[in-house]
Image (cartoon, rainbow, N blue to C red):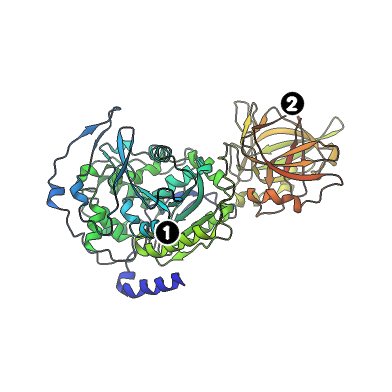
């Protein structure tokens, strides 16, 4: 009901002409992103928003003379980073932004944050993107604070009221991730309810995946986290030299940039780096569905009275060129995140707010089940367009969901997707299978996996058969002391269709008649140790003699929708042999599962999930 009322207010407030503006041309709409398993691509490029020509309104409402004429005092940190601070006079009289000022010091730089509501309340942490700042959350903060939550909205370093390093090279993805982690640590924040948008999602989702035990709930609004295969990032660093020949304002730029996804985003990287006047308020206005007031546009410009203050907003788009696989472990951990997760989108943002991107995250995160994932009549800057409505929806989500046990952050192998092909051969009266797999070399894109003709593979390699064994996901955190995950100089590779694999090991499957019969243990040559972190939930099968097998990976061979979060209750689905039982527990200390004399005993259940004997 609240949504319907506000939707009507939205439509009454804004004319048809205003809604024909360019709505939500996503700043990150050309991201290369990891896709869910049922997408055709493991890595894809999101669509850019449809762009319609529009007569643009110039940025008005100038900053005060005191702000523009204030002396610029260059300061230097102990590590030699030169920075300046936006004069306090630049923030005088900002509409709807009368929050108290708070700072933490990180590496000799001050990071500003809003901290409203009772200090004992549940923490709501809000992260913004580029070129906005905490002003973006002005409509949401009071609603949540008045409901009893401690609402924290930080300003990324170089933005808002935070200090402004002068060198654009300071602004790198890893550095901003580290700053935000340090901010969380310094404020000792736990049980965090995270709200992220735009670059706030690239930073925030990475941190939530790397520090998952700190987060109670996660809400994304027009966001994503890219995974780009090593060596294939198409984006280049710009020169960061001001080009006086660039006269297009933000609106004209977005209307005229290339429709090619990669080329168009590279143009945005170059434009942001080199345009003489990158006006934050102009960008936010362009990518919002509503018409901002002159004073609101001025408020977005307030932190940046001249180009010297703009290193961060000039450099942020180029940070995409430094992203490759460092986000993979966070993606894998979030794929097991069982606490409440919600993805809201602005329907006019056809990049980060696209239905495909929204559905990718809903499918990927177990905690998304049952949440009211909405599509609002909003553009990229959804907090401006429907801030009150979004806050009320977030409030309802907070009050209607319960937090389960914290998720211990996963190790490098945790929830890693991989596929295997077993090629069995007769050998000394036994049936021994070569086990080929993708760990460390390929993400086993679903479309490529589905396209493999396994009968042809068996013929090509003169094997008794070719047994598909995937897609699979590791339940273990690390593989130690062996080459199950890592590569070495002697690694042997093969190409099965479009899927690259390497020889992992061999397995004696004679006891199962050369097949993978359920609940029949086979000998696998293995030198590694599976390591599970303390606090990890593990899943075990105990046979009728009391021997315990611990799950090492779960499978989507029989159930394409199976997720880590489903495993605790898996015993209800299994048809175990007489006297066997399935159980789940949380480790009170780390667990190592090791092969003895190079041999591990491994079995599968009828769904294809694999377990190794604890010896």
Q: Residues within 10 Å of mark 2 (few under 14, many from 20)?
A: few
Q: Is residue 346 above or below residue 235?
A: below
Q: Residues within 10 Å of mark 1 (few under 14, many from 20)?
A: some
Residue positioned 71% across, 37% down in the render: 435
Q: Of the residues tagged 1 and 2, which is closer to the observer?
A: 1
Q: Secondary structure at mark 2?
A: loop
Q: Which residue is mark 2?
A: 598
- Residue 219 - label: none
x then y, percent, for residue 541? 77, 42
Q: In the rendered image, which quarter is residue 58 located in?
A: bottom left
Q: Secondary structure at mark 1?
A: loop
x then y, percent, for residue 125? 42, 49
Q: In the rendered image, which quarter is residue 602 located in?
A: top right
Visible in this render: residue 451? Answer: no
Q: Which residue is mark 1?
A: 147
Residue 474 relative to residue 116: left or right: right
Q: Is residue 59 above or below residue 187?
A: below
Q: Is residue 386 above or below residue 245?
A: below
Question: Considering depth in this image, is 523 or 543 the residue closer to the camera?
Answer: 543
Residue 314 relative to residue 72: left or right: right
Callout count: 2
Residue 507 relative to residue 586: left or right: right
Which of marks 2 and 1 precedes in the sequence? 1
Residue positioned 57% across, 45% down in the render: 406
Q: Is residue 575 above or below residue 184?
A: below
x then y, percent, for residue 372? 52, 63
Residue 208 relative to residue 335: left or right: left
Question: Considering depth in this image, is 583 or 318 the residue closer to the camera?
Answer: 583
Work out how far the residue at label 1 is from the one at label 2, CA to CA, in angstroms. 59 Å
x then y, percent, for residue 146? 39, 59
Residue reaching furthest top?
Answer: 597
Please identify the quadrant where the C terminus is shown: top right
């Amino acid at each position: 009901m609240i949504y319907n009322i506000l939707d009507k207010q939205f439509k009454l407030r804004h004319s048809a002409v205003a809604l024909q503006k360019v709505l939500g041309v996503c700043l990150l709409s050309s991201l290369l992103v990891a896709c869910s398993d049922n997408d055709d691509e493991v890595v894809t490029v999101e669509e850019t928003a449809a762009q319609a020509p529009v007569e643009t309104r110039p940025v008005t409402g100038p900053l005060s003379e005191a702000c523009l004429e204030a002396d610029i005092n260059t300061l230097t940190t102990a590590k030699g980073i030169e920075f300046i601070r936006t004069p306090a006079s630049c923030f005088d009289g900002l509409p709807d932004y009368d929050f108290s000022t708070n700072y933490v010091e990180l590496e000799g730089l001050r990071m500003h944050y809003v901290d409203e509501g009772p200090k004992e309340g549940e923490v709501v942490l809000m992260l913004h993107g580029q070129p906005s700042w905490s002003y973006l959350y002005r409509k949401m903060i009071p609603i949540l604070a008045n409901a009893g939550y401690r609402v924290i909205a930080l300003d990324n370093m170089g933005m808002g009221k935070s200090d402004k390093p002068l060198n654009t090279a300071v602004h790198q993805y890893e550095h901003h991730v580290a700053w935000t982690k340090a901010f969380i640590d310094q404020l000792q924040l736990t049980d965090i309810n995270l709200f992220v948008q735009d670059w706030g999602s690239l930073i925030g989702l990475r941190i939530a995946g790397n520090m998952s035990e700190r987060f109670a709930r996660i809400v994304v609004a027009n966001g994503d986290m890219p995974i780009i295969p090593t060596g294939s990032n198409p984006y280049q660093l710009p020169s960061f030299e001001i080009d006086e020949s660039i006269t297009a304002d933000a609106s004209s730029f977005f209307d005229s940039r290339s429709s090619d996804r990669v080329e168009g985003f590279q143009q945005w990287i170059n434009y942001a780096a080199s345009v003489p006047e990158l006006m934050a308020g102009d960008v936010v206005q362009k990518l919002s569905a509503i018409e901002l007031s002159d004073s609101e546009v001025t408020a977005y410009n307030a932190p940046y009275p001249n180009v010297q203050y703009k290193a961060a907003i000039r450099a942020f788009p180029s940070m995409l060129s430094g992203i490759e696989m460092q986000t993979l472990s966070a993606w894998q951990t979030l794929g097991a995140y069982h606490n409440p997760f919600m993805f809201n989108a602005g329907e006019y943002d056809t990049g980060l707010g696209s239905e495909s991107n929204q559905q990718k995250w809903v499918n990927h995160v177990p905690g998304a089940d049952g949440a009211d994932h909405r599509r609002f009549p909003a553009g990229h800057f959804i907090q401006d367009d429907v801030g009150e409505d979004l806050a009320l929806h977030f409030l309802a989500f907070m009050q209607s969901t319960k937090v389960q046990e914290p998720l211990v952050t996963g190790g490098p192998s945790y929830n890693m997707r991989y596929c295997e092909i077993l090629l069995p051969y007769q050998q000394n009266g036994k049936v021994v299978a070569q086990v080929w797999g993708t760990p460390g070399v390929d993400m086993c894109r679903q479309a490529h996996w589905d396209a493999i003709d396994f009968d042809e593979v068996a013929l090509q390699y003169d094997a008794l058969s070719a047994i598909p064994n995937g897609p699979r996901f590791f339940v273990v955190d690390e593989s130690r002391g062996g080459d199950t995950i890592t590569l070495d100089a002697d690694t042997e590779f093969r190409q099965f269709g479009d899927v690259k694999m390497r020889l992992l090991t061999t397995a004696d499957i004679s006891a199962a008649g050369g097949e993978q019969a359920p609940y029949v243990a086979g000998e696998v040559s293995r030198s590694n140790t599976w390591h599970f972190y303390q606090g990890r939930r593990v899943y075990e099968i105990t046979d009728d003699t009391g021997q315990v097998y611990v799950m090492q990976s779960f499978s989507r061979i029989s159930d394409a929708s199976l997720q880590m979060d489903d495993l605790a209750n898996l015993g209800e689905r299994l048809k175990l042999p007489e006297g066997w039982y399935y159980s789940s527990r949380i480790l009170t200390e780390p667990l190592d599962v090791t092969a003895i004399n190079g041999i591990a005993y491994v079995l599968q259940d009828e769904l294809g999930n694999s377990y190794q004997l604890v010896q």
